Amino acid sequence: MTKAESALLQALDAFMAQKLGQIDNSHLQAAMAYSINAGGKRVRPLLLLTVVSLFNGSVTTALPAAAGLEFVHTYSLIHDDLPAMDNDDLRRGQPTSHKQFGEAQAILAGDALLTDAFGIIATSDIAADLRIRLVALLAQAAGSHGMVSGQVRDLDGEHVVLDLAGLKRLHQQKTGALLLAAIQMGATLAQVSAADFEALSAFGQAFGLGFQIHDDILDVTASTAMLGKTANKDVAEAKNTFVSLLGLEGAQAALAEQVRLAQTALARLSVDATPLQQFLNYLK
């Protein structure tokens, strides 16, 4: 991690700690903070803040949007881990929320994080017209047109083998939508040109799909200790992953193609895209 990225994350974590500290229900606060403070790479808010910084926008002003994004992402992890969904025991190297607090409390902590995310953005000092666009982008990515729809496709896929187009569609929603929203929310805050917005969106789409392909590859090449979460328990029988569909070498080739598309998009930007290029190094 670069010094610039570290500084952005320190500011983000301080802001989120402030917001969590304002919750007057200690039991709920503990459950919410448990998952927020579990660590993780903070890829989504860091993408948002990096785009803002890249175009000389105000990082301080952007913190509520970044925090809201991380709240939504963390809620999705809590709910994905539930027994009715993926039924996972570990997340970010520690017991999942429902293992630590019980299923009901985990559900409510996720509900609170999702709801508070929009409240943080809506009551921020960001200009009103930008706030509306940010809320719309986040809702589009998180709801029935994005992440939730992708999760439903994933559940439906337990009973059918998807083709490549179907698998891409699933993960463009389940994983890619929130990563794309991070890029577009940052672009909105920085008020970039239409051409730069289009190039950043193309980068976000390629990066989002590449991120999932990379995750699928890790599921068959990394241990639970390395992943910090429960490794794929039935990876050999998993129906709908890029590795199961394309094979390991095919998945690696698909990942390389997404990296190439992302690099092509970055080359179209009107500014030096080196800070965003660093994110592609994670996929390599």
Image (cartoon, rainbow, N blue to C red):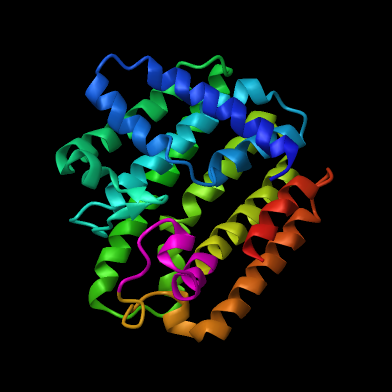
State the image coordinates of residue 72 (x, y, percent, origin top left).
Answer: 40, 38
Q: Picture coordinates of residue 136 (x, y %)?
A: 46, 35
- Residue 244 sits above or below residue 270 on the image: below
Query: Where residue 280 sits in the image (x, y, percent)?
Result: 68, 58
Residue 188 in view of the camera: no
Q: Residue at x 80, y 54 (%)?
A: 268
235 horizontally vs 123: left or right: left
Whether residue 230 is in magenta: the answer is yes
Q: Is residue 171 left or right of residue 152?
A: right
Q: Is residue 109 above or below residue 277?
A: above
Toward the viewer: 68 or 249?
A: 249
Say whether residue 31 is magenta.
no
- Predominant SS of the magenta segment: helix
Report the magenta residues as a range: 214-233
Left/right placement of residue 204 relative to residue 229 reads: right
* Residue at 37% in and 30% down: 33
Q: 68 or 184: which is nearer to us?
A: 68
